[in-house]
Amino acid sequence: MSYQTVDSSRTPPVRIGLIGAGWMGAFHARSLAQRIPGATLAVIADPAVEAATKLAAELGVERVTAEAADLFADPEIDAVVIAGPIRFHAPLSIAAVRAGKHVFCEKPGSTTLEELGEVEAAVAEAGVHWQIGFNRRYAADFLAARRDLAAGTVGTPQLLRSLTRDPGTGSIPNAARVPQWTMFLETLIHDFDALNWMNPGAEPLTVHVLADALVEPSFKPAGFIDTAVATIRYSNGAIAVAEASFSALYGYDVRGETFGSAGMVQAGRPTETAARRYTAAGLGAETPRLNIELFADAYRDELADFAVHVAARRDGAESPDHGVPLTPGLADARRALAVARACIESVQSGAPADVVGSGVDAAQEGAQAVAGAVTP
Ligand SMILES: NC(=O)c1ccc[n+]([C@@H]2O[C@H](COP(=O)([O-])OP(=O)(O)OC[C@H]3O[C@@H](n4cnc5c(N)ncnc54)[C@H](O)[C@@H]3O)[C@@H](O)[C@H]2O)c1
């Protein structure tokens, strides 16, 4: 036998700590541990340490902790993935970047624009990479549509549409525990980013929302919303519609569309596979049932992109160029959150609301205000 030696040296994987081992965190953990060669899942943190332990055992991760602070203090951790409840996003981001860690944060990144300003100030000071989990951008059909838009295929955008229908059974058993503005801060936030992204160069200016509890009407007096439609007016004149329901009996349904002066692009996969079933009853097909089915590859690819960005920072290399704006950062988080906050205002007043604080100027003002607040 005469084996030859090969130089197998390659960029070492970035070492990532996961914060939050719930539904989304567990999926991200599996991607990091099993599907992204550029990353290693080194530690899992969750105050529910038994959830972290179970996940770690499944994936062969050797360390868990109840304290996210342990990850921040660990010199062997390059970056963290934040997948805890949304009220902790901003404080966890700020603590992580102050410790020099790069951050991937699930959406929305913060619940208020003021708090997001504090994240922006901390990231600017630390000079780290901060990325938000707008996974829809990484879905092959959405990305193909965005490349068409960049190529001018659609001409000037005039009408846009984005929708999210979460899978359901026709009732929402945990309605009493769903925080009031989840519809805008956690669900439609994806649609707001998709619309902003698919209307390049335009800014959202005003919104008008109709919202209701059509699935669970008995929870409406408590402020619960399970169905909503938002119209958004953009600076280029385009008019967009975002709509969502928390209970689609046929599965998980996400679509996006930009219609313009020269044509239209559409994204969104109505069926799970290309197979069709023709019977005496007619034509049928399987539909995606869960977000982790429909977006399995997109969730992986957003984290793979994150790992490449972190490695580039570590190695002093160029950041990846995707040909179109892809990697969502703080400016994208701010723009989508500004639309979400305006939608909440529109629901409260029953009238149209201006989108305030969506731009870079507002971000800089926020950062200055925060700097002013912490400087003696
Ligand atoms: N991108 C998507 O399509 C998508 C889909 C679902 C959820 N999400 C987002 O993922 C995040 C988590 O949602 P989820 O559905 O996984 O929730 P979840 O309730 O299933 O999990 C949250 C986990 O965070 C843990 N936790 C609580 N406080 C914490 C803290 N201070 N630090 C660290 N961990 C803490 C909980 O113990 C729990 O294990 C949210 O931001 C949500 O909006 C994104």
Image: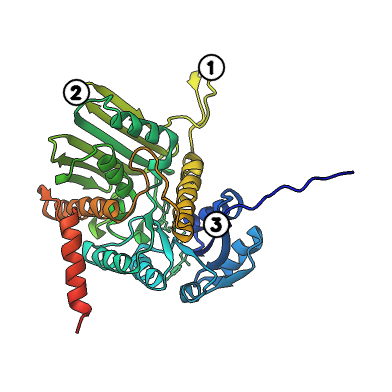
Q: Write the residue at 23% across / 51% down.
A: 335
Give the label on residue 261, or none: 2
The quarter of the image holding the C terminus is bottom left
Is residue 9 something one can see in this rendering?
Answer: yes
Residue at which label 3 appears:
29
Q: Is residue 165 above or below residue 7?
A: above
The location of residue 6, given as percent across then percent down, is 72, 47
Instruction: Residue type at mark 1: give it.
Output: Tyr
Q: Earlier in the sequence, mark 3 or mark 1?
A: 3
Q: Left or right: 322 with respect to 281?
A: left
Label 2 CB-ligand 1 distance < 8 A: no
Q: Left or right: 298 with respect to 204?
A: right
Q: Earlier in the sequence, mark 1 or mark 2?
A: 2
- CB of mark 3 within 8 Å of CB of mark 1? no
Q: Is residue 34 above or below residue 16?
A: above
For ligand 1, give the image quadrant. Answer: bottom left
